[in-house]
């Protein structure tokens, strides 16, 4: 009897420990990256398996280590029962490689973009972006981290032993019901997951450690801090290193944002501390903070939450023990060089609850909202005319924040960014230069990174146009067919490989049901009137006789 109790205690103790140690996602690296997105199951609460989505696994995805300057061939296989896309959040890639709503991967299909990593060392991420379904797929678990390395960062004496002193932390508010099932509604968050588990334990060595923080939540902002008694030395924002480490006790991270911080744990061997979120300190209107008029309220709001338990262990032999004083030199673009201003007004329509708009419009895949010129510098003036803060994300590369509410941004937001949290009834001004990529048809997105808002249509799209000849240096093989799935109407087919000699649409039996000989250099539009719903294949023959095919779904 005694023995049994002891055994039970031992087993439950082990169980708890195994359950609670911080999961470190595996690494994929090199110049060929294969991702398979599929359904799975995960026990958020012990003994209660819940359906999930993951890349190459049940939940989340591998961390992609990409070297700046390398050309990477990606293959994404969609084994979901639903359409998806994969967006490389923060990476500077051509529109047809960006994985926005135009680059649908149908169930059973694959997508194989290839591009050169042009970004600076930093922490980026990937997640689905199919219009109207992004929140569901991300809430179910589809998200992974991307770590870009470059020569400049490699010269700095920073911790970079993955999982030992360089720790990826995917932080996500989620709603989980009493049966342990994920709730597909971001208004009711009641848990915080760190790399997929609730309140895990991490063992960190007593030396300088690096935390790579990603807010992969749908709606809420973290105000991070630790109980360690040492400040967080912030070294990077969304898209790369800051000029110099910035000593902080609190760090805000809104949905989509990333930060890297160093913690100097030297001499703390044997102690414990917690990574916390102080939602009770957030300003009103920032989701996760104090309740506001007409704002959804959830159990995690306006509270102090423990995210991660850290046990400090003995230092490693090659420990980093000092925080470098200088990191890089960021040079923001000059507002005087801007040739265009884009104004975005964020609003909700009164009496319509959470019904979100940009410039009074909802997203329409067939409407281009803004056009900018290749090579130009553009100022985005964002004014939030609602009572809720919105994290605004612009695709295509990074930006610099020029102003928040008419004043220079706080130092933690002065570096390379791709998300800016615009608080309720406040403004932000950011500057972005459009180098390298243009496309006459496929736009980049800009949107609120609260995923329910994005899905609801709080998103627009802009084209980068090359005024000189409509063709810029493009990556190989870009072919985009949209919208997909398509309802009866027009289908747009754009090929970056060159002109389109002819287009065929084949039915599931391989029979040609439509054929066109456009011999066109630009995009081709096909009328799908009269097609019965179902899967079809679009086959494109280029001027050189080369063929490519894309599956489409007519609804
Ligand atoms: Cu992280 Cu357009 O998204
Ligand atoms: Cu993005
Ligand atoms: Cu929003």
Image: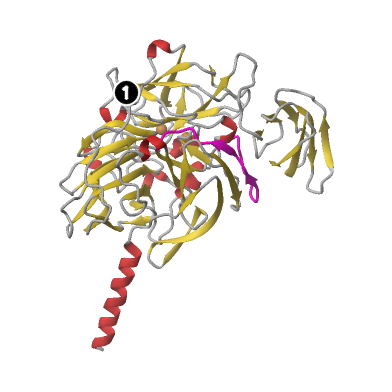
Say left or right for 483 vs 512.
left
Say left or right for 543 vs 355.
right
The local crowd at label 1, few if under 14, some if 14 to 19, many if 20 or more residues have their Cα within 10 Å, is some
Confirm whether residue 99 shows in the render: no
Give x and y (percent) for residue 66. Answer: 47, 42
Give x and y (percent) for residue 486. Answer: 67, 37
Say left or right for 5 vs 445.
left
Magenta stretch: dominant secondary structure: loop
Q: Which residues are magenta?
A: 102-121
> What's the coloring here?
secondary structure
Is residue 51 highlighted in magenta? no
Q: Residue at x 38, y 51 (%)?
A: 175
The secondary structure type at the circle numbered 1 is loop
Q: Quadrant of ligand 3?
A: top left
Decide which of 455, 328 is in the foreground and name it.
328
Give x and y (percent) for residue 94. Answer: 56, 30
Q: How many marks?
A: 1
What is the quadrant of residue 528 in the picture?
A: top right
Q: Residue at x 46, y 16 (%)?
A: 377
Which image quadrant: the C terminus?
top right
Is residue 115 highlighted in magenta? yes
Confirm whether residue 337 shows in the render: yes
Give x and y (percent) for residue 283. Answer: 25, 33
Q: Residue at x 68, y 36 (%)?
A: 487
Mark 1 lies on residue: 426
Decide which of 343, 159 is in the foreground and name it.
159
Say left or right for 127 vs 157.
right
What is the quadrant of residue 387 in the picture?
A: top left
Q: Is residue 349 above or below residue 39?
A: above
């Amino acid at each position: 009897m005694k023995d049994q109790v002891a055994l039970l205690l031992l087993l439950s103790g082990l169980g708890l420990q195994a359950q609670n140690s911080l999961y470190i996602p595996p690494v994929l690296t090199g110049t060929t990256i294969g991702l398979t997105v599929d359904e799975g199951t995960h026990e958020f609460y012990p003994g209660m398996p819940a359906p999930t989505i993951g890349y190459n696994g049940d939940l989340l995805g591998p961390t992609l280590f990409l070297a700046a300057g390398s050309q990477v061939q990606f293959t994404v296989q969609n084994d979901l029962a639903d359409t998806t896309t994969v967006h490389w959040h923060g990476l500077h890639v051509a529109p047809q490689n960006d994985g926005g709503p135009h680059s649908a991967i149908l169930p059973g299909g694959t997508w194989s973009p290839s591009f050169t990593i042009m970004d600076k060392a930093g922490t980026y991420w990937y997640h689905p972006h199919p219009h109207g379904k992004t929140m569901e797929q991300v809430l179910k678990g589809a998200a992974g981290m991307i770590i870009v390395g470059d020569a400049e960062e490699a010269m700095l004496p920073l911790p970079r032993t993955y999982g030992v002193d360089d720790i990826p932390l995917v932080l996500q508010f989620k709603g989980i019901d009493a049966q342990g099932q994920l709730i597909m509604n971001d208004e009711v968050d009641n848990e915080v997951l760190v790399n997929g588990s609730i309140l895990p334990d991490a063992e960190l060595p007593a030396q300088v450690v690096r935390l790579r923080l990603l807010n992969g939540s749908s709606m809420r902002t973290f105000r991070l801090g630790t109980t360690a008694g040492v400040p967080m030395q912030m070294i990077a924002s969304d898209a790369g290193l800051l000029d110099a480490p910035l000593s902080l006790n609190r760090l805000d991270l809104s949905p989509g944002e990333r930060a890297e911080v160093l913690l100097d744990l030297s001499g703390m061997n044997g102690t414990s501390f917690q990574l916390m979120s102080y939602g009770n300190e957030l300003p009103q209107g920032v989701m996760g903070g104090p309740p506001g008029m007409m704002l959804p309220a959830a159990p995690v709001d306006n509270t102090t939450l423990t995210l991660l338990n850290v046990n400090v262990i003995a230092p490693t032999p090659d420990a980093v023990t000092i925080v470098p004083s200088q990191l890089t030199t960021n040079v923001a673009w000059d507002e005087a060089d801007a040739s265009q201003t884009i104004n975005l007004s964020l609003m909700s329509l009164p009496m319509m609850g959470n019904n979100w708009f940009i410039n009074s419009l909802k997203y329409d895949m067939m409407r281009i909202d803004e056009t900018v010129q290749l090579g130009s510098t553009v100022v985005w003036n964002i004014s939030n005319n609602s009572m809720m803060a919105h994290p605004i994300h612009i695709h295509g590369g990074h930006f610099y924040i020029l102003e928040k509410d008419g004043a220079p941004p706080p130092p933690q937001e002065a570096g390379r960014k791709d998300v800016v949290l615009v608080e309720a009834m406040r403004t932000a001004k950011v500057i972005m230069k459009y180098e390298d990529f243009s496309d006459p048809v496929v736009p980049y997105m800009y949107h609120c990174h609260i995923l329910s808002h994005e899905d609801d249509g709080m998103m627009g799209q802009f084209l980068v146009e090359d005024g000189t000849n409509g063709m810029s240096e493009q990556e190989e093989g870009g072919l985009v067919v949209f919208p997909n799935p398509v309802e009866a109407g027009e289908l747009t087919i754009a090929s970056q490989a060159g002109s389109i000699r002819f287009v065929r649409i084949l039915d599931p039996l391989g029979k040609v049901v439509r054929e066109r000989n456009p011999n066109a250099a630009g995009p081709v539009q096909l009328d799908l009137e009269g097609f019965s719903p179902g899967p079809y294949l679009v086959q494109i023959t280029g001027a050189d006789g080369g063929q490519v095919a894309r599956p489409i779904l007519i609804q």
